[in-house]
Amino acid sequence: MLDTIRQHFGTLRCDAAYWSLRFVDERSRYVCVRQDVAEAPNLDRDSGAMLTVFDGGGYGYAATADLSAAGLQAALDRAHDWARATARHSVLPADAAPPHPRGRRVSPGAGEALPTGRELLDLALAESAAAGFDERIVDWQASIEVREADHLLLTNHGGDVHQQYRFMVPDVSATAHANGDTQTRSLSGRGFCRQGGRKVLADAQFAGAGRRLAEEALALVGAPNCPTGRMDVLLMPDQMMLQIHESIGHPLELDRILGDERNYAGTSFVTLDMFGSYRYGSELLNVSFDPTPAEEYASYAFDDEGAAARKTLLIERGILQRPLGGELSQRRAGAPGVANTRACSWNRPPIDRMANLNVEPGASSLADMIAGIERGVMLKTNLSWSIDDSRNKFQFGCEWGQLIENGKLTAVVKNPNYRGVSATFWRSLKAVGDQDTFDMLGTPTCGKGEPNQAIGVGHASPACVFGGIDVFGGEE
Amino acid sequence: MEACFHELAAALDRALQPGETYTAYFAAEQSDFVRFNQGRVRQPGSVAQAELSIDLIRGRRHATCSLTLCGRAAADLPRLPGALQELRALIADVPEDPFLLYATDVHSSSSKRPGQLPPAERAVDAIATAAAGLDMVGIYAAGKICRGFANSFGQRNWHEVENFNFDWSLYHRSDKAVKSAYAGFAWSDAELGGRMEAARVHLEHLKAAPRTLDPGRYSAYLSPAAMQELLDMLCWGGFSEKQRQVKQSPLQKFYDGQLQLSGMLTMAENAGGGVAPAFQGEGYLKPASLPLIAGGLPGSTMISPRTAQEYALAENGADGDEAPGSIDMAGGALADADVLGALGTGIYIGNLWYCNFSDRMNCRVTGMTRFASFWVEHGRIVAPLNVMRFDDSLFRVLGPNLEALGATPELLIDNHTYDGRGTSSARVPGALIRDFSLTL
C-alpha cells in the first residue's frame, strides 16, 4: 500500500511552493469481556490521506479516503483552492512552509506476531472470571485493544518519512456496591497504554488484575470518606499522569498561548514573557518533552509536519524554559519549541499537542516519602478531572486514597479529591520519587482542537509529594 | 452517497453464506472546516469521510468490523469480501453472546433535509467581514452528514442533512469573552451580521473591572448554555438502564427513591424534534418522545437492545451508550426580561466548562464558570466575573435549590466534531438557583 501511495504521489501536480501528502493506515483489534460474557470482538480498518498546501501566505488541507491517483489529485486541488482563497485572511507568516525530511521509525514489538483474537479473548476471560468472586461485585470487565499503524509523510521536495507503530491498551475494572454506595477500581484509569507487543500486557500486570482490583473495590466500598483539610498528598504515577497533563502540558501548549484554542479548549495562564524566568515549580521539578523512550505511548521520530523530534527540558529546576509548540507556532510566536505538531488521524490537520511529557525521576524512595509525611493521603488512579480554561484552578479526584499518619500508611478512604491552582501548586513539590517509583503511562484520548481531535499522549512520572494541599471527600 | 450505501448493502446481502445475518451502520460526511483566530483564518480545509460498521452474525455468535470507505462503490465494494472473511474467522473462535439482540421486523425509512449553504469560501469572506476589527476565534463547520442502516432482512434507513454550525467567541482580553453560535440549514449573511453585532454589544459588559468572589454560596442564574453542561452530566450514564442495573448511575438514589429532584423538572428524549437519525445501530426505531423525568419523578430509562436482552426488558430505541441525543427540558415561568430582577444580587453564569463528577453516587458535580459571567447587584450587571469553581450536588441544584426555570427553552445544536460532526441537540431553559456552591 505504501508503495502505491508513493507511486500516486509521483503523479500529482501542483504549482504551490510547498505541498505534502500524509497517509495514515490503521488496523486495530478490540476484545472485551464483561461479567464473563464476551462481547463481539471488533476489527477496525481505517486509511486515508491528507493533502496540504502552503502557497502565497495561504494554507489549505483536504482529507480523503479515495486513495486513487485521481482521488488524491482532487484533494490536492481542493487544498490548493483553500490556500489561494484564504491567503488574504491568513494568520500565518507569508513564507511559512514545513521541512522535507527523510526517515523511518518502528515501534518495539512491531516485528512480532500479533496475538490472535482467541489469545486476547482468553486473557480477558481469565481476568473477568477472577473478578466476579463476591456478590457485592456488581460489574466487572476486561478488555484489550491492539492497534497497528503506518504513517507516511511525503513532500513535494523529496521528503519521505515512514513511521510504523504498534499500540497496546489493556484495561480491567471492577465495581463493588454495598451499603448504598458504589466504588470502582481500574487498571490505571485506562492510563496504561504503550507502544509494543505482548510485553506491554506483562508490564501492565494484566494477569491477576481482575482479582486484585475487585478486592480493592470491596475495600473502598467499606471505607470512610476521605477527610477534609490541608495536608500533604503523595501522588502515585497514575495520578501524576493527569496532574502533569492538565496543569503543565495544556498550559504550555503554544497554540493555546497564541489564542487558537480560545473558543474550545481554552487559553493559558502562561504568557510568552514567562519563558526563561518564571518559577513554575520547586527546585525539584524537571519536566521533559521526550519522544524517545521506545515504549512510551507518544514516541516518534518526526512530527506530522516533518520536524525531527528530540528530548528537550521544558522546566528545569523549577524554572520554565520553553513551550510545547511546533515549528509553525514557533514562527508565529517568535519563541523556541519542540517537534509536537500532530494530528489524530488522516482526517484532521496537525496542531500543537503534548506527545510524551514526563517528570524526571528524583532521589526519594517511596518508603522515605511516606515516612516523611506526618499527616497526608496517598492518591492513586485518576477518576475525575476538571480545570479552568486558562489551566489554572483545578480539582481532581482519584479512585483510591490511603491515609498517611505519622509516617505510616493507614486506613483506606474513598472519594478522595483535591484542588489547587497550577500557578502555585507545583511550587509545593516537596519530594520526587526515584526510579523505583517511576512508571510510564498515558492516555489514548486527549481532546483538543477545532475540528475536535482525540489523540494519544504519554506521561511517565515518579511518585511525588506536595505539601499543604486542600483535600476533601464525598458527600456525608 | 446514498446510492453507494445501497450498493454496499446489496453486496452484503449477496455475500452472506447460509446461516448468516448482518446489521450494518453507515456514517459519512463531506465537511468544510474553517478555523479562525484574531478574526483571521488559521486552518481552512475539507474532509470527506465514510465508515461502514458491519456486525456479522451466525446464530448467537458474532463479530464486528469498521471499514473506512471513500464513497465510490467501485473502490469500496471490493473491500467487503476480505472484511467478511476476517469476521468469519473471528466468529469461529468466539463464544455465543447471550445478550445479542437486533431488529428483525423491517421498518425502512428515509429522511433528507437539504440545506442552502453558500460556497465555503464565500462564508469565510462573510465571517471575516462581520468580524473585522474584532478579536474573533472560532470554527465554521458545514456540509452534508449522512447516516444509514441496513440488515439482511431488507431493512434500509437513511438520514441526510446539510447544515452549518459557526461557533465563535469575541474576546476583550485574557479570558474575558462572549461565546456565540449560528447554526442551521439556510445561511444568511444578514443573520450572521446581526448575531455578530449582538455579541459585540454584549462584549462591552466585559470591559468593566472584573470581580473576584470568595468561595461561598450564591444566588445564581444559569443560562440555557450553562444548564446544558449540567444536563450533559445527567446524560453521562444518568438515564442509562445498564448503569442503573449495575448501580453506577449518578441518578441511582433518584431511581431508588432516596433523593428527590424538583417538581419543576420535566425532560424527555425528543428524537422527533431533534436533528439526529431516528434509528439506532441494531435497526430499532427511536420513539418520537421518551419521558425521562416528569414533574420531578422518574420516567423511563434509556434501554439499548443489549441491555434489554441482559435484563429481560423491552428496548426503547436507545443507542449502545444509552445517552439522550435530543434531550428536551420543559421551561418554567421566568420570562427572559425578568431574569436579572429575579436574580437580584448574585451571579449570572453564561457558560459552564469542564464539568466532572466529584462524587458520582451523590450526583455531585464540579466545574468552572466561563465566558460571559457577571456579578449582578439589585438586578443590574455590575462587573464581569473572574472564573470560579463550583462543586455542588445536582440533587440540591435541581432539587430544593431550584427556584425557577426560564420560560423560553433554547435549542442548542451540538458543535462537537470528534470523529465527525455531531448530530445531537438539546432544548434547555435557563434556571434560577439559590445557594449555588462556589469553592475556588
Image: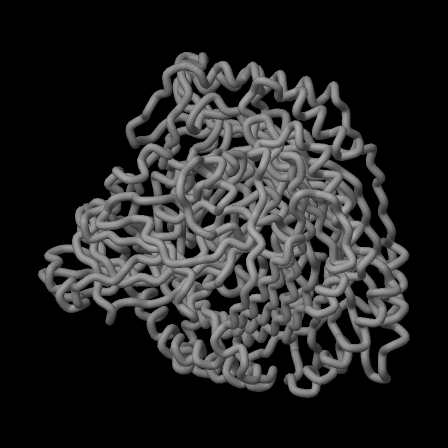
Q: How many marks?
A: 0
- Left or right: A468 in relation to B28: left
Nearer to me, B316 or B376: B376
The correct choice, above or below, for B389 with respect to B145 in the image is: above
For the N terminus of chain A, give its image quadrant.
Answer: bottom right
Residue farthest to the front, as pictured: A157
Nearer to me, A340 or B379: A340
Q: Residue at x 24, y 69 (%)?
A: A435
* Residue A131 in view, yes or no: no
- Left or right: B193 in relation to A411: right
Percent x, y of residue B276: 73, 47
- Left or right: A431 in relation to B107: left
The correct choice, above or below, for A128 with respect to A14 in the image is: below
* Residue A337 in view, yes or no: yes
Percent x, y of residue A187: 41, 69
Q: Residue at x 88, y 64 (%)?
A: B74
- Left or right: A191 in relation to A71: left
Percent x, y of residue B384: 42, 20
Q: Residue at x 80, y 43 (%)?
A: B161
- Residue B92, by quadrant, is bottom right
Q: Residue at x 59, y 85 (%)?
A: A118
